[in-house]
Image (cartoon, coloured by chain):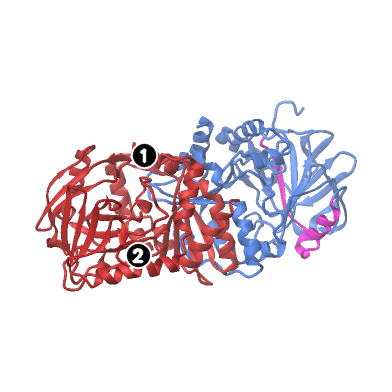
Chain colours: A red, B blue
Amino acid sequence: MDPRIREHAQTIVDHSVELQAGDDVVIQLPPEAEDLAVALYELCGEREASPTWLAGSDRAARGFLLAAGESYETPENRLAFYEETDVFILARGGPSVTEQSDVPPANTAAYKRATRPLQEERLSKRWCLTQVPTTGHAQLAEMSTEAYENFVYDAISLDWEAQRKFQETMVTLLDGADEVRIVAGDETDLTLSVAGNTTLNDYGEKNLPGGEVFTAPVVDSVEGEVVFDIPLMRQGRKIEDVWLSFAGGEVVDHRAGRNESLLTEILNTDDGARRLGELGIGMNRAIDQFTANMLFDEKMGDTVHLAVGAAYPETVGDDNTQNESAEHVDMIIDMSENSRIELDGDVVQRDGTFVFENGFA
Amino acid sequence: MDPRIREHAQTIVDHSVELQAGDDVVIQLPPEAEDLAVALYELCGEREASPTWLAGSDRAARGFLLAAGESYETPENRLAFYEETDVFILARGGPSVTEQSDVPPANTAAYKRATRPLQEERLSKRWCLTQVPTTGHAQLAEMSTEAYENFVYDAISLDWEAQRKFQETMVTLLDGADEVRIVAGDETDLTLSVAGNTTLNDYGEKNLPGGEVFTAPVVDSVEGEVVFDIPLMRQGRKIEDVWLSFAGGEVVDHRAGRNESLLTEILNTDDGARRLGELGIGMNRAIDQFTANMLFDEKMGDTVHLAVGAAYPETVGDDNTQNESAEHVDMIIDMSENSRIELDGDVVQRDGTFVFENGFA
């Protein structure tokens, strides 16, 4: 087995979910990821934890969702299972990412509603979402499988304690600021307030790779225009060159260079889908290219992302409003050139270099 | 996908477990069996049942058991899961059958003890054990994978209603008899009583393939000598040419042409392991060769099998003693030539042909 697979398992177990003796663990991996399952089972054995591998098969899910239509009940056996589970380890991967592309969205949405109690149960426990570098995502990234493996293992094998400290500096700056201004290229100039909200440091725990700091904009504070340079995937399709114009916190105009109707559909989901729920700063410089996979893209070094839709409750201060929506769609701005982030008028990042790094002055 | 896989799934769902709307289903398949998972998920969708695929990986199990040693607790999350599950579908298969050959037997035994509540939960529900024709079992059978696929699909796609009726005739004969005598070749001449016990008809429900009728010998009634022509697998090793001598129901002498020490180990497990727990008559003539897999071998047409060890409680009459043991080891006699089964002195099978079949007279 590739030795990086055992290192991956070790990082998940020791860093991301902090496995304890007696933990009951659900491991949701695609059938292709048997090597990672083996490595995780070995570690569970060593640590006196009890693992169960749920096979995540997009082909099986497609068969089920196509046949079942729009009517589902919450599976009671899974709910009982999840209630008694301490740790969830999930990985994306598989031979193809488009296996569910012919499932009617209404079927998927109905199934998601029925299984929301399972999601809520999982989110209330220790959990980690990670990636196995299989051919489907390599193809999505327009990379060879071997190059994609290198990319994935580089991104997840950072020195996470050093990364935590590096990111903590940015957390402190953001938490001390009221107004954020993002300027990039000729078209992006956006201001928003984060006053009273809380910035979180993602250093590889619930997401592996981690590598971002994120908070919630004050809902009505967003003003200006923004271009998202990096494509956005929606139901297997790319939305490119998104442009949004904000006034009073709301999207008042929008365009996309490709698949604009999908963008319109997102924004029309509900009121919250026209407002921002997240401001994130990508700080994982091992992620140096777009791979059409938000687990990686949003952590890319020298990027900022904004999400329309629901805010994470942990990021919203008690006196502020939490944006609510059925959507949470991240969109990414390239900050590597001709750009800056200002906090209360002070530049804290210029052309991808932070104020606390060599080379800023 | 091979169309026989969807037929296999249909037989499991409609015949073996009689899937109902609202059933919560656990599907335990090896990672290689994704096609069967897809077919079962499709049918669950159609029938408004909820499937969950547990990946059965011998490599992962090995890693866990090697690392964990001899100490296990019952996994509470799996127990809660199984308690709320209505139907279990399990399949053997995988790229190799010897992946767990270097796990210390004490580890496996300790794990089995800890997970016995899971087994009991499963056995109290609707369940089916079947086979996916993967390379590991093809190699074990000394067959090409394609020939093995043909063999498996032939054995499981009988007309099960016709098979039920065919076997029912034998059930009636056995249930009406007191003494059974089995004569084969020059060395096998065994008598035993089945008076007061019950014969069951296995036509593809809990085992797919099915194809046997079976009951329990009266514990102290077994007398005579028997040669088992067909090898017996134990921990991946073949025990060949087993010879047992019975007096007063007990094995009083034994030999094997190969791996005799494994046979001795079985018989010395406990008192019940030296007595018979089962008499079975194989009646599935699509199974026409030994494949070193008891799921098939014990149903082979023109065979009789005897098991040392535990009796199935459903086969033991209220006034008879149920043989108890930690073991249940089936051994098979070839009845196709120079052989007969007598019930109370009447020949009911000669050289593999039953009294109720053409060609007997």
Residue drawn at x 55%, y 35% as measured from the top left: B161
Q: Where is residue A174 in the image (x, y as percent from the top left)?
A: 25, 68
Q: Which mark is residue A67?
A: 1
Q: Tell me where residue B37 appears, x and y as whole percent.
A: 49, 43
Residue visible at 47% across and 69% down?
A18
Q: How crowded is mark 1: few (under 14 residues within 10 Å), some or many (20 or more)?
A: some
Label annotation for residue B120: none
Mark 2, Cα crowd under 10 Å, few <14 / some 14-19 / many 20+, is: few
Give the magenta part as a residue range.
B259-284
Q: Mark 2 lies on which chain?
A: A
Q: Residue B11 location, x and y as percent?
A: 51, 38
Give the vertical position of A349 relative to B224 (above or below): below
Q: In which image quadrant can residue A311 be found? A: bottom left
Residue at the spot x=26%, y=41% of the render?
A239
Q: Mark 2 points at which residue?
A: A357
Left or right of residue A247, residue B237 in this image: right
